[in-house]
Amino acid sequence: MKKALLLAMLLFVTLSWNIGIAPQAFAQEKIKLSYADYAAPGYDQLSYIKHFIKRIGEETNGRVEITLYPAEQLVKAMQQYEAMIQGTIDMCNITPAYFSGKVPLLLLTIESSYWRPADSVIIASRISKEIAKIFAKDGVKYMGWSTEQPPAVTIGTKPFKMFDDYKGMKIRAPGKSAKVINNWGGTGVSIPAPDLYMALQNKVVDGAFLSIGTVEGARLWEVAPAVTTTITGGTPQMACMNMKKWESLPDDIKKAFEKVNREMVPWAYEHATAYSKSLDETLKKNFKIYHLRTPEEHEKFVKAGRDVYSRPLIKKFGEPAQAIWDKVLAAAQECADARKEGKTPPFFTE
């Protein structure tokens, strides 16, 4: 019986080759991709990626398998962009503040005092064509959606209600955000997020200016008793793929990716909105000292820190930077207008 079955299978394969049917028509080989991220398990930004991976698997009927490597398992946070260009990793989320030297114009998307939580997801989708062109120059494919780094807070040994509270303080801030701390009277220090817990514990820094998501993911209330929150928005982390890897994908797989990429924008917006609301209670519960800046306090800090990215970029790059900045501001205004009317702002330009 077994011998007969084996002969039948052999005959079937032989006939398939003779009539021009390739073996992959019967069993297509799976496409395996790596997705690297610096965030450790527990960070909310991984929730976006896990949902994306799940949807890609569903839309490709399991043909595409994406493995998530969190906590810098493949590359360090500050090496992600170079690794993406080189193809060492297939996919990752690019944090603009970390790579200001590589993609300076993307810093226009982190002037978060102009918008509110979850708006960065919409802004990144509204200027997706501009973002895609910037990345394409380096051989990187922008997938058209982003996670949101939730609103920034300042943590330390005390509340930060006024500029004097920053004087003489070394405050960790990501990338060029250190300039904001300098404008507020402190000394901005750049330290990768995964190293921050030990830096606070060992008093290498006196505090940190960072997203609420990083605070929660790293449980930083264990090494910093006070948190000062604001009403500003978050910043995008842009989902990307190595361009050569993207171009190597079959057309039907690309279509599946494009479908999921587009649906990720409204999903991410809803997720970011709900997450930001829930985090406020988490901060109140876990920090010994909780301070929400008053509108007057907020306005003073905004005035001192606003345009720290956009102004020098427009001065250096001229019209290209101004054109992107105009679209960012227009999208932010649309978000504000829609919020007043209790509506959801449009996700795409077309």
Image (cartoon, helix red, strand yellow):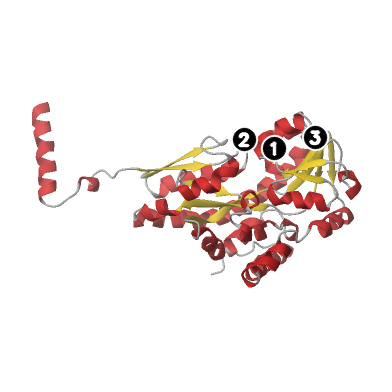
Given the image, on which type of amino acid does mark 1 rest?
A: Glu
In x, y percent, where is residue 316? 67, 66
Q: On the image, numbered disc 2 is attached to which residue?
A: 42
Ranked by sequence position, the earlier of labels 1 and 3 is 1
Left or right: residue 29 versus residue 65 is left
> Horizontally, is 299 left or right of 311 in the view?
right
> Of residues 69 and 60, which is closer to you in this image?
69
Question: Who's the residue at 57% across and 39% down the image?
Answer: 76
Q: Estimate the x, y position of residue 160 in percent, counting from the top left.
A: 86, 44
How far from the left and from the top, in percent, is residue 46? 57, 41
Q: Is residue 308 above or below residue 149?
A: below
Q: Quadrant of the N terminus?
A: top left
Rendered view: 197 above or below 307: above
Looking at marks 2 and 3 on the same chain, the residue that comes earlier in the sequence is marked by: 2
- Which residue: 35% across, 56% down? 252
Q: Which residue is mark 1?
A: 216
Find residue 250 and report its image quarter.
bottom left
Give the residue furthest to the right.
164
Q: Are marks 1 and 2 in contact (CB under 8 Å)?
A: yes
- Circles 1 and 3 in contact, beta carbons < 8 Å: no
